């Protein structure tokens, strides 16, 4: 094919590789198998089998099984609720519509709080109840038969898609998870080595941390799917979570080390520390895991021994030099220890070493109840508007308008930008309508037999499958595969007349317009300024309300904060100064929160009583400042932190035991970091507390 001819092809065809073609052909074969079985069984809506295959289709086997399982759960729950509401309403249609709108709102609320395919189960439970319940409410005698038929058709599509993903050109999600985990680990080792060598300025560090954060969150999402197709990983699910926690923690810990290298390394040189940093800088991510583990263990022990040696009876040189060296050693020790843990855990997961007892991890996500409630109310209002339109117009397409409104609301209300997400879906629906007119009125009336039907459907479905593999065209391809068979109305007996087709197209258009209007008019999606406000607010309020006294592990706070950052990263442009500052403020917020946990832990590990009381009060005052805001309160917090720091320094000079001296040094190091964050990122925290609008990191008088 000539270069000019290739340019005429769509990008999803022009750039498709072997994997994309295999995915498209495999999914088309599964959909045709589901259609054939449905026709043989005499199911009245076999198009739902075809649509289900493409809805659950994913490039990785575990993802198909996971999505199919949650779709089946959502479908059964939705069908059961539909039957319950029909039986309770007893042909009282007003009660039924109020109840079904409330159910859809509840499912939208839950779907907004959850992630991945768990969220999808609630989406399905919401609109399946509408798809089954609305026709059943109009014809109660056929309610049970309708519910059984829909569940059967959807189950058949799930089974065919799952079998095809496992048996035909399989690509296990577990293998992809281990490959990406290895890539993430290599990138982290390179980041730590480059930071220790002084090869990163602040801009380069932030860019690499942002990329690692994005890939780390994607890896956590892939982990959930990998557990569905690997019994070995399911038995080691705790280790998988622990690996994710360790790698996320390194993204935080590398910041203070890089700050020491760029600010203090030349001023406070120390031969032993220089040798340690040179050893860290020489880390090779391609090294054999046994040698890498031993090297990291040696560096960790070297950092701890050097820190002990520096803690003499007298502070060597100036206090600033002493505590700067302690900061570097503490974070070198932590990074080497976490890298060693990550290497060992990955080796156990990939069967490179026998499994040994290791502390497992747990996962927690950020829950935005306010946004979830908005999404639920918006869905209820849209359904109410569609029902009102049906009642006032008495249109024959009324049931289809209400059903389509519910489907679109359930699918897109949970998105941060529902209008943008629905726009591609609307383009695909328009394409499906044009294709349905062509096929139903021109191509199919002259063909006979299942083989001819497959021949005609192949070009459309193979191209749509290719479009689904490309993010920019995935919504269009998915909409074509969902709406095209519904508009085509393939069944045991085919009707090729134009009137039902155009009625369905009109109902589809009106049904899609109602939720889009709701998205535009009722709590419209965030612009860049709103995204900044939400990020500041959510992070600061998470820290302000965190139950520190309950002694929850560090990774729970860390995963929640990073999850919130990851959700809003796509809305931020780090090349713009304000967005870059916002990302730095968000990372500083994570460090501040971990510092509060660390100071609280020190209070329980044997520091003098006056110091423990001061640290406890400081943690409480910091959370209060985050919660209540106020520039004067925030600036006073910096002064209070400095007073506690000096108290810890005095206690260090008077301490006698090595353990107490070690804890007091760590308290001073952490308090120095807290002061730098409070003063350097005051604008972020004041915006998060609602005291001021986001205008940048600096606030007059904060320096």
Image (tube, helix red, strand yellow):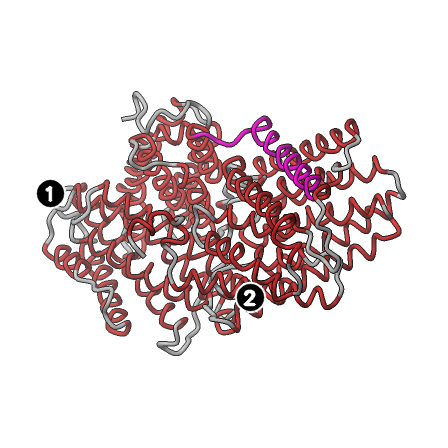
Q: Which residue is label 1 attached to?
A: 267
Depth order, front residue of 395/171: 395
| In-image side of 282 versus 517 (left or right) | left
Mark 2–mark 1 distance (CA, rounded to whole Å)? 67 Å
Queried whether the magenta region covers residue 502, the answer comes back as yes
Q: Position of residue 283 (x, y in %)?
A: 20, 63
Depth order, front residue of 455/583: 455
Q: Are marks 2 and 1 in contact (CB under 8 Å)?
A: no
| In-image side of 607 versus 327 (left or right) | right
Q: Secondary structure at mark 2?
A: helix
Depth order, front residue of 64/658: 64
Q: Quadrant of residue 347?
A: bottom left
Q: Position of residue 156 (x, y in %)?
A: 67, 64
Q: Position of residue 324 (x, y in %)?
A: 20, 45
Does 106 sit above or below residue 69?
Answer: above
Q: Which residue is label 2 attached to?
A: 29
Q: Position of residue 425 (x, y in %)?
A: 54, 42
| In-image side of 322 versus 521 (left or right) | left
Depth order, front residue of 570/565: 570
Residue span colored magenta: 501-527
Badge 2 local density, few (<14 within 10 Å), some, or many (20+)? many
């Amino acid at each position: 094919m000539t270069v000019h001819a290739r340019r005429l092809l769509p990008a999803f065809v022009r750039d498709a590789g072997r994997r994309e073609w295999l995915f498209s052909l495999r999914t088309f074969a599964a959909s045709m198998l589901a259609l054939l079985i449905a026709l043989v069984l005499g199911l009245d809506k076999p198009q739902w089998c075809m649509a289900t295959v493409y809805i659950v289709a994913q490039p990785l086997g575990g993802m198909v099984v996971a999505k199919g399982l949650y779709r089946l759960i959502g479908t059964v729950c939705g069908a059961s609720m539909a039957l319950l509401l029909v039986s309770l309403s007893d042909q009282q249609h007003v009660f039924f519509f109020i109840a079904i709108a409330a159910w859809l709102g509840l499912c939208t609320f839950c779907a907004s709080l959850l992630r991945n395919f768990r969220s999808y189960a609630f989406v399905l439970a919401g609109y399946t109840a509408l798809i089954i319940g609305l026709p059943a409410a109009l014809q109660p005698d056929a309610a049970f038969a309708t519910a059984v038929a829909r569940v059967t058709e959807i189950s058949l599509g799930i089974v065919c898609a799952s079998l095809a993903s496992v048996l035909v050109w399989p690509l296990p999600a577990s293998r992809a998870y281990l490959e990406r985990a290895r890539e993430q680990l290599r990138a982290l080792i390179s980041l730590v080595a480059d930071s220790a060598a002084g090869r990163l300025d602040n801009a380069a560090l932030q860019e690499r941390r942002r990329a690692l954060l994005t890939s780390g969150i994607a890896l956590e999402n892939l982990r959930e799917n990998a557990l569905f197709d690997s019994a070995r990983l399911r038995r080691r699910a705790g280790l998988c979570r622990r690996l994710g926690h360790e790698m996320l923690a390194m993204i935080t810990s590398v910041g203070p080390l890089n700050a020491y290298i760029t600010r203090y390394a030349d001023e406070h040189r120390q031969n032993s520390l220089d040798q340690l940093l040179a050893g860290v800088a020489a880390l090779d991510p391609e090294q054999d895991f046994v040698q890498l583990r031993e090297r990291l263990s040696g560096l960790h022990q070297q950092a701890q021994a050097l820190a002990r040696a520096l803690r003499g009876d007298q502070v060597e040189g100036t206090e600033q030099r002493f505590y700067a060296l302690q900061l570097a050693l503490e974070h070198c020790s932590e990074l080497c220890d976490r890298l060693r843990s990550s290497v060992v855990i990955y080796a156990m997961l990939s069967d490179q070493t026998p499994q040994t007892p290791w502390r497992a991890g747990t996962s927690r996500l950020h829950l935005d109840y306010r946004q979830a409630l908005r999404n639920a109310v918006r869905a209820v209002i849209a359904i109410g508007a569609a029902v009102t339109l049906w009642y006032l117009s008495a249109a024959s397409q009324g049931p289809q308008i209400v059903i389509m409104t519910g489907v679109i609301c359930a699918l897109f209300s949970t998105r941060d930008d529902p209008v943008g997400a629905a726009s591609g879906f609307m383009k695909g629906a328009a394409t499906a309508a044009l294709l349905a007119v062509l096929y139903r009125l021109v191509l199919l009336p002259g063909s006979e037999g299942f083989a001819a039907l497959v021949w005609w459907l192949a070009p459309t479905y193979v191209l749509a499958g290719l479009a689904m593999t490309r993010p920019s065209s995935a919504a269009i391809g998915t909409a074509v595969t969902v709406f095209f068979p519904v508009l085509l109305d393939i069944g045991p007996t085919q009707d090729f007349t134009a009137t039902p087709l155009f009625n369905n197209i009109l109902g589809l258009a009106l049904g899609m317009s109602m939720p889009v209007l709701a998205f535009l008019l009722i709590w419209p999606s965030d612009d860049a300024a709103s995204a900044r406000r939400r990020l500041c607010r959510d992070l600061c309020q998470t820290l302000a309300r965190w139950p520190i006294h309950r002694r929850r592990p560090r990774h729970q706070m860390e995963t929640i904060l990073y999850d919130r950052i990851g959700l809003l990263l796509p809305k931020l442009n780090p090349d713009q100064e304000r967005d870059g500052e916002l990302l730095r403020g968000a990372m500083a917020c994570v460090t501040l929160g971990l510092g509060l946990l660390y100071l609280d832990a020190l209070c329980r590990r044997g520091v003098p009583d006056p110091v423990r009381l001061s640290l406890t009060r400081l943690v409480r005052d910091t959370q209060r400042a985050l919660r209540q805001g106020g520039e004067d309160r925030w600036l006073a917090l910096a002064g209070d932190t400095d007073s506690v720091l000096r108290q810890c320094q005095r206690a260090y000079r008077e301490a006698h035991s090595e353990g107490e001296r070690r804890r007091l040094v760590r308290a001073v190091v952490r308090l120095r970091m807290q002061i730098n964050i409070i003063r350097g990122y005051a604008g972020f925290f004041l915006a998060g507390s609602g005291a001021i609008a986001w205008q940048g990191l600096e606030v007059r008088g904060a320096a």
